[in-house]
Image (cartoon, rainbow, N blue to C red):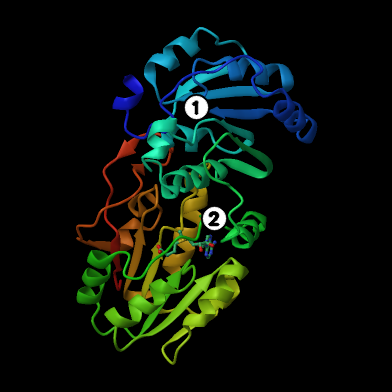
Amino acid sequence: MVAALTPGSHQLVDWTAPDRYPEIFAAAAAAAPDARHILSFGCSTGEECVSLAQYFPKAEIVGAEINVLSLLKAMKKRSDRIRFVYSSDRILRRLGGFDVVFCMAVLRAPKKQQRLGNYPFALFEERALFLESLVRPGGLFVIHNSMYRFSVKRGKFAKVASLLHPGCHQGPNRTALNRYPEIFAAAAAASPDARRILSFGCSTGEECVTLADYFPRAQIVGAEINPVVLLKAMKNRSDRIRFVYASDRILKRLGGFDALFCMAVLRSAGHYPFEIYEERALFLETLVRPGGLLVIHNSPYRFGDAARKHSYETIPVDASRDIGSFLPDGVTEVEPDGSIFRKLST
Ligand SMILES: C[S@@+](CC[C@H](N)C(=O)[O-])C[C@H]1O[C@@H](n2cnc3c(N)ncnc32)[C@H](O)[C@@H]1O
């Protein structure tokens, strides 16, 4: 009942048991014998966490559960190595960077709902991709008894390439044409004569194609750090759109942009300290010419909390965000301070 009323709940049945998957637990423990930080996503009443504590004797186990009644029961199994948390994305992101994430019999629906087609692939995919982003590079993602297969070939190489790149902020490269119409329109109104535009973290290039429409007189540079994704973006090249590898050297050389867009890039599903955001945000702002626009959107921190906030004025825009805004401590949620900033001339 509580599960059915909880938005975001996948499997509504909370059945579990101690040592329910001995072959899988043993294989995972053999593959990651030194694991220290483990997540049991959808831990139900906590038996899975107790089992994992035995299979991984050096690890701290976090059990995450969305059903508050199951969570309350699980709490009774707390110990010095096992803790339980409510399964919100914010909490999991904060804890993320796990050596192993277990997701057992969670991403599915009860049989009747399956027959009714009430558990579409998109639902599975969204959660599976979120969970895998909580796994640290080199860690294990253990997903079992789900209705769909995790090993979807699409995007796999891109994912691996992003995990291997130390400077990569946001790994997933999801994008779309005209993804932020309010922001693009407001930026175009604020800077109608822009000639040189950068899309930093352009993914497969749809953002650049969109910007070319909003800024009909501009040359657009798309910069991407993931070479697999960059290769795909190249297919969107035109006489007004070019793509470059996002190295600081190349970007510095091209700098002096009339508008710089950094959309859904300065973030990460795992732990993402303010200093990492600040370093990139301050680098990007040096690429904007005086009077030009810096557009940073869908990041967990506020540009205004970075050092050079007094050199900018905010241009108001009403656009939805898919992530909360936090103070530099990464925990205290605050009102966002806007997405479009004009660099003052003095
Ligand atoms: C979620 S996509 C956003 C794409 C597009 N900006 C949008 O909002 O639709 C994030 C992209 O940023 C890229 N990225 C991450 N860190 C980067 C960095 N340090 N420099 C350039 N690109 C980066 C990723 O490879 C990925 O393609």
Is 123 or 217 nearer to us in this picture? Answer: 123
Q: Is residue 338 above or below residue 211?
A: above
Residue 224 location (% of width, % of height) = 53, 69
Mark 2 crowdedness (10 Å alpha carbons): few <14, some 14-19, many ≥20? many
Q: Nearer the viewer, mark 2 or mark 1?
A: 1
Q: Is residue 346 above or below residue 242?
A: above
Residue with the mark numbered 1: 42
Left or right: 251, with 141 as reference point: left
Q: Quadrant of the C terminus?
A: bottom left
Q: Quadrant of the N terminus?
A: top left
Residue 262 location (% of width, % of height) = 41, 64
Is 138 or 42 nearer to us in this picture? Answer: 42
Q: Which residue occupies the extreme top position in the image?
A: 76
Distance from Cα at disc 2 to Cα at disc 1 = 24 Å
What amino acid type should be assigned to the residue bearing mark 1?
A: Gly
Residue with the mark numbered 2: 171
Residue at (63, 29) in percent of width and height: 38
Is 4 or 70 nearer to us in this picture? Answer: 4
SS of the residue at dot 2? loop
